[in-house]
Amino acid sequence: MHELSIAMNILEIVTQTCREQGYQRVDSVSVRIGRASGVMTEALNFAFECARSGTVADQARIVIEEVPVGGHCRDCGKGFQVDEAFVFACPLCGGTAFQITSGHELELAELEVDDEG
Ligand SMILES: [Zn+2]
């Protein structure tokens, strides 16, 4: 399960951050997941809940922010965003000389911590 290793990776970063900053408990973990990253948000949610026990994020919830796929077209010179996970042609002009600029995100966006002990 791909999502489990991602969840464990996230928890590793969270644990390390808490150790460095001296946080005792994490309330929530926000991640940004691009639609083109291939990550199933529901599966990641589930994997996180399985993997969090015994870590500083034991009680934490995961907040997943989905990032739509976007790109920039060299044919029409415009930026675009699509609802699908893949782009085969520029939705504005149909050109194929485009560059994907968002949608592959897989990053930790924010940590909400309880630093009062
Ligand atoms: Zn275009």
Image (cartoon, grey):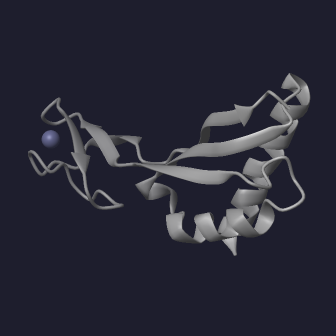
In front here: 44 or 94? Answer: 44
Q: Nearer the viewer, residue 70 or 53?
A: 53
Residue closest to the eye, 9 or 99: 9
Callout count: 0
Left or right: residue 105 compared with residue 45: left
For this view, does 70 lie left or right of residue 47? Answer: left
Q: Position of residue 104 (x, y in %)?
A: 49, 48
Is residue 12 left or right of 31 when viewed as pictured? Answer: right
Q: Position of residue 30 (x, y in %)?
A: 58, 43
Residue 51 seen in render? yes
Q: Residue furthest front?
A: 116
Q: Position of residue 3 (x, y in %)?
A: 66, 66
Q: Is residue 78 above or below residue 26?
A: above
Q: Is residue 40 visible?
A: no
Residue 58 found in image quarter: bottom right
Residue 36 at x, y = what percent? 44, 56
Image position of 113 with respect to 100: above or below: above
Tell me which residue sits at (90%, 58%) in the image.
54
Q: Residue furthest bottom?
A: 1
Q: Residue at x 87, y 52 (%)?
A: 55
Q: What is the quadrant of the N terminus in the image?
A: bottom right
Residue occupying image coordinates x 34% and y 40%: 99
Write down the quadrant of residue 6 in the picture: bottom right
Asked whether 90 or 96 is in front, the reply is 90
Which quarter of the rendering shows the C terminus? top right
Q: State ligand 1's quadrant.
A: top left
45 sits left or right of 98 in the view: right
Direction top: furthest residue = 21
